[in-house]
Image (tube, coloured by chain):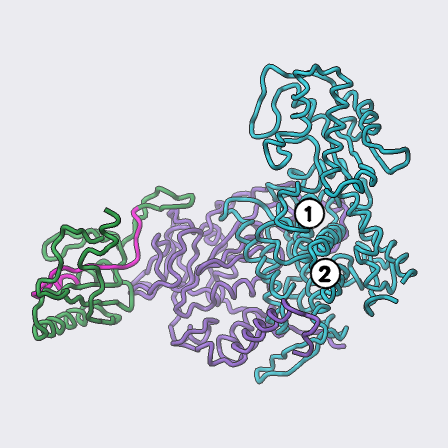
Chain colours: A purple, B green, C cyan
Amino acid sequence: MAAYKRQFYPGSTTPAKNRRRYMDPKVKLKKLRDVSMDDVVRIMGHRNPGEDYKSIHPPIEEGKEPDCPIRKLVTPIEGAKHGDRIRYIQFTDSVYFAPISPYQRAWMYLSRYRGIDTGTLSGRQIIEVRERDLEVLAKEYIDNETFDPALTGIRGATVHGHACRLDEHGLMFDAWQRYVWDDEKKEVVYVKDQVAIPLDRRISVGKPAAMSDLKKRTTIFRADGVDMRDDKEVTMYGLRIHKLRTLGGYQPWKVKGE
Amino acid sequence: MTSKSAPAADYAGVPLPEVQILTNRLLSAETTERVLNALDVIPNIRQINMTGESLPKTINSGPGKGLPNNHSERKVIHVGGQEVELRYLVGGFYIELDVEDEETMDKRLEEIKEACDATIEHGYTLQVGRYSKYKPTLHDYRSE
Amino acid sequence: MPKYEDVVDLYDDCGKRIAKDVPLEAISPLRNNAIKKIVSLTKRTVAVNLAGIEKALKTGSMTGGGVVIKGKEIDIPLVENADKIAEIVKNAVQVYDGDGTVVKVKSGGKNLVVIVPEERMDAGVEYTTGFTVTAAATTEAIIDTFDVPMYKANMVKAAVWGRYPQTITFQGANVKSILEVPQNNEGAGFALRNIMANHVVSLVNRNAMQGTALSAIFEQCGSYEMGDTIGNFERGALLSLAYQGLNADNMVYNIVKKNGKTGTVGTVIESLMGRAIDDGVIRVKETLPSGYKVYTTDDLPKWNAYAAAGMVAAVMVNVGAARAAQGVPSTILYYNDLLEHESGLPGVDYGRAEGVGVGMSFFSHSIYGGGGPGLFHGNHVVTRHAKGVVIPAITAGNCLDGGTQTFSAEATSGLFKEVFGDIEEFSKPMQYVAAEAKKVKKKL
């Protein structure tokens, strides 16, 4: 029998299609900018560029791990092999048609990466990975289409802003003003790292996208965009799972062909 | 909280009307200053309260705790020759009108709309009603 | 006649078949003697930390909480005299020769492992017999061997038993049981669910497959004990035990093997869906206009067991690749959510595992204030709801940690590894249960 191919998510509206696209590891996400790796490291603030990686345990050597068949089958990621610390990057996504919303980041990360720990909180999504692997991932997700300079924030703490009105330049509110609007270049520039410690240089993350473009790219259902209730497949899915969980929680053996 | 001893704000025998203006975008300090100065010249305004998103003076958590925040919009603005210290990125105004008849109120409303149209670039919604407390309630007696 | 039509092949931790066409009932805790023995040993096996007692008596520092009792210190060489103490303890605990009592000296006298005879368990109703008998025998052995005077004898009691009965638990005791005191169980039948994942990690010497098996056995026995697996519910529990815990039809091992090198949680779901379709467990109910296929099943309990096996595989792949246990709750949460979106069928334990993943994510990360995933058990307030299926996945993840956890198994449960590490019923449950299953099969 032919190998099963994932279908990811129901729905025929734009947000539903976009969700499937971000989740599908076969889709190469568009690179929209190129923030240098050193600048990504600076914004995260876990180490200085060029500094050695600190470790939390000795490197993993083959044959010296506990005797477990699963360890033999599962290859550790690079940072794990070196015993790197586990560090994080956290993105805040505005409700105003940001390219992706926090919860879908989890689906996307776990469909595209291995060896990660991620969590959705109010308005933001943290991802924790061994440091050297984190840096690769962080650069990818700052450079690619899931990031918009105005509507995505890199925020380790005081993340408040995802449901706030935008400011007059169209930037998501940030009480710590980690990034500012450069009116001459019409670009967003980071002046503080993700926990608001001032950076010694200004790091541009480029020009924000137009709202008309973002409405085509977003995964967010909104009454003033695409209403989730207008996607019958998506609403059917929610009701179906709710019903089956309820029936399964009662007498699962009686649920047949539902 | 409303103090029991403060005079109730109902000079006309009814609570004074308030104009609620919620802006579609959060306003910079400069815009806030312009809006307030445009409102300042309108007669019959008893007081203006503002709301918005709080801007802390210092970084209040994490490894940078205690560092100055240096938010460009947290600063002193000048309204009608007076200094006002802004601690918010303002997104709402509550303008209490000291008016006794609807004719005056409508006139002032028009002036307020004109002032806002000239200063608030990204639009706003405006409603008239009463949005804040104007006389003591049971809670104020209880908590004294 | 077997009660259920289902038959499974059992495979060991290395993916080798060790029992063929086993009827589901043969792995039931009610029929399988290996499981019964594991439960029995769990109650009866107790560790005595002689070095700890010696230190406590010498310094007066005992019963936990920084308590030091000055002026009544006793300096006696317990570790040196471990053999002698062991003999006295054995004579005291044993009912008759050959009753199964075991007292072994471990780590050069630093520890004793005591297995209390069934006779003593049969003559009482509480599993605490293992602890109380051993603690009392050790106290008496020390007092007698070293002629401890009456007014100092209470120090020996405190060094052995800890602060109990001033406390509910045996706080600061130097006798340790895998089980908690009954007063700490959240309700009826929780005893075998009140075993920290880290304890199991230690008992299986960090073998993730065996850890999953042992946790699944403890959890499902707990389900039996709390009345959850009665009547029509039994088959579902046994299917979960088989597929998730005992590597039935080599599903867990095969999925991990296929996805171990480059796979993600997403590809594990892909493998599981393929397997469930090929095995006829699920089928397409309808295809929606977008092309999305809604799947359905005529056997929801079996789908649930498949999903539970996939969940363990997802943890093994994602957490295993990180060699870091902290990703366990998020893997449990999003695996289930992704699987539900993929299939249109409910996730593990009909949605409960996903819910547990949410709460556990919060409780196991520093935003809440500490505590790693290894500290969780089926009696914990956030993990107790998905009975039987979540703790095995947590244990699997903790087995695969490479040294990132403050609350590692070595730190919280090191004694169990040292003392119980060579008891094969605990370290190789898959083989033991399969061997016994073959015997049950012949009887059915």
Q: Quadrant of the C terminus of chain C?
A: bottom right
Whole-percent x, y for residue A242 in the image:
56, 71
**Residue beneath the point at 65% across and 50% down:** C323
- Residue C246, given in percent of the width and then of the height, sits at 78, 57
Indicate the chain on which mark 2 is placed.
C
Q: Are marks 2 and 1 on the same chain?
A: yes
Q: Toward which corner of the image does residue B8 lie, by quadrant? A: bottom left
Quadrant of the rendered image containing residue C201: top right
Q: Secondary structure at mark 2?
A: loop
Query: Is C134 displayed left or right of A93 in the figure?
Result: right
**Residue type of the residue flagged with mark 1:** Ala
The three-letter code of the residue at mark 2 reads Thr
Q: Chain of mark 1?
A: C
Position of residue C11 measured from the top left corner of the image (x, y, whole percent): 82, 58
Q: From the image, tell me which residue sits under label 1.
A: C191
Q: Nearer the viewer, residue C84 or A196?
A: C84
Tell me the magenta residue range: B36-57
Question: Which residue does the image show at 11% across and 55% down from the upper left?
Answer: B7
Residue identified by numbered label 2: C229
Query: Tag 1 or tag 2, which sits nearer the N-term?
Result: 1
